[in-house]
Image: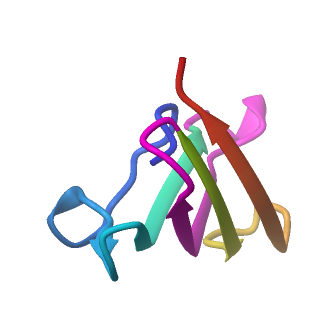
Amino acid sequence: MVPWASALSPGREPICLTEKSRAFFEASATQLARGRDGGTLADWNIGAAYLLSRETQIGFRAGIAANRNTPDGFVLFELAQRY
């Protein structure tokens, strides 16, 4: 999950599809601010991840804006390595 955003998914954990694959649905707010400071940026997104090893994961997510301040949508491919 994204550590700098408030994430909501069933049980606050990803849904395990198999031992190595996960799926999730999130509502996130990457910026909480007054209108004069840019306003709140919020989005809805869905994605999945596959664990290549205990330390490496690849993933995909796509999202849409949850309010007028947020850009329309996004697609993200992820490669994460834990050190």
The answer to which quarter of the image holds residue 70 is bottom right
In the image, residue 47 above or below residue 59: below
In the image, residue 78 above or below residue 80: below
> In this view of the protein, can residue 58 be seen by the observer?
yes
View extreme (bottom): residue? 17
Q: How is the image coloured?
A: rainbow
> In this view of the protein, can residue 34 be seen by the observer?
no
- In front: 9, or 52? 52
The residue depicted at 69 percent of the width and 68 percent of the height is 60
Is 59 included in the stretch rendered in magenta? no
- In front: 26, or 71? 26
Is 44 included in the stretch rendered in magenta? yes
- In front: 30, or 25? 25
Q: What is the quadrant of the C terminus in the image?
A: top right
Pinpoint residue 4: horizontal percent, then vertical percent.
Answer: 51, 32
View extreme (front): residue? 53
Pinpoint residue 65: horizontal percent, then vertical percent.
Answer: 70, 71
Pinpoint residue 3: horizontal percent, then vertical percent.
Answer: 46, 34
Q: What residue span does the magenta drawing correspond to?
A: 32-55
The residue depicted at 45 percent of the width and 66 percent of the height is 26
Pinpoint residue 69: horizontal percent, then vertical percent.
Answer: 76, 58
Say left or right for 72 vs 64: right
Say left or right for 39 vs 44: right
The residue depicted at 56 percent of the width and 55 percent of the height is 52
View extreme (top): residue? 83
The residue depicted at 54 percent of the width and 65 percent of the height is 49
In the image, residue 65 above or below residue 33: below
